[in-house]
Amino acid sequence: MSLKQNLSDLESQVKDLSPGEGLALLADLFPGKVVFSTSLGQEDQVITQMIASQNLPIQIFSLDTGRLFPETLELLSRTESKYKTRIKVYYPERDSVENWVAKHGINGFYESVENRKSCCFVRKVEPLKRALAGNAVWVTGLRAEQSANRSEMKRIEWDESNQIIKYNPLLDWTFDEMIAYIAEHRIPYNPLHDQGFVSIGCAPCTRAILPGEDARAGRWWWEDSKKECGLHSR
């Protein structure tokens, strides 16, 4: 049976499980083939804690685009220290970045949605494909509350682009549930969150949100789009 054909069975198996239980089940069903992508956001920090506290054999990795906030990189170091684990870091291909900058300029992503998406592809999508290659399950920190696009997602999905099962353990969690879990377990988080930054990506493409704004409004604020970089396109 192919990975894609396993979806309905897996969905029924994780339906009534907590996120931690779901992670443990998938790690058992697909030994050595489950990976978790963390951008060091609050959701991702919760999942890292769940993986580390159970000592699950799930590889945690992150994408360093070369344009991250210093606070994000410092949090990566603190997280590794607290949970005594190593987060594997993937970087964009040097030639691809150099060619993109030569063609569009260092901040050419401000000029059009097309430019921005091509920058995201070079710095995020391509490295992600390398990180996911050869694995069976991709764990993410997506929550339905984050955007209209994400509200349509399921806890177990098939990612056609990467030919992999996608597990979103926190999909049904509210923001308040997440914050309470972080406080209860004393999970380290990015100090920028306390300054109004809800969704944190590359520094030139992220700002704090204003009162009443959507959680994703601080990402690529200069454009009218679905506020996605291509990692979680549907």
Image (spheres, grey):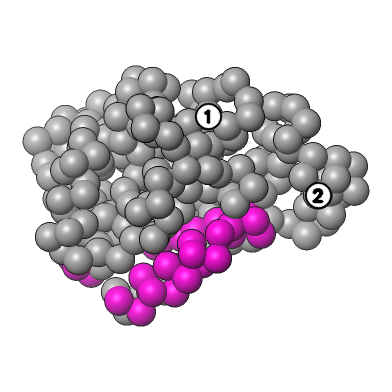
Is 210 colored magenta in this rendering? Answer: no
Q: Position of residue 196 (x, y in %)?
A: 40, 46
Instruction: Name the secondary structure under disc 2.
Output: loop
Pick whichever, 221 or 169, lies toward us.
Answer: 221
Helix, strand or loop at mark 1:
loop
Q: Earlier in the sequence, mark 1 or mark 2?
A: 2
Q: At 11% from the left edge and 41% from the top edge, which residue is drawn?
A: 17
Find residue 31 and name its label.
none
- Residue 57, by quadrant, is bottom left
Q: Which mark is residue 227?
A: 1
- Crowding at label 1, few (<14), some or many (≥20) Cα neighbours within 10 Å? some
**Nearer-the-camera pick, 2 or 54:** 54
* Residue 127 in sight from this viewpoint: no
Q: Which image quadrant: the N terminus?
A: top left
Q: Amino acid at mark 1?
A: Lys
Provide the residue span drawn in magenta.
53-82
Q: Is residue 29 depicted above or below 111 in this figure?
A: below
> On screen, 208 above or below 40?
above
Q: Which residue is mark 2?
A: 106
Q: Position of residue 120 (x, y in %)?
A: 65, 41
Q: Is residue 82 visible?
A: yes
Query: In the image, what residue type sits under mark 2?
Result: Ile
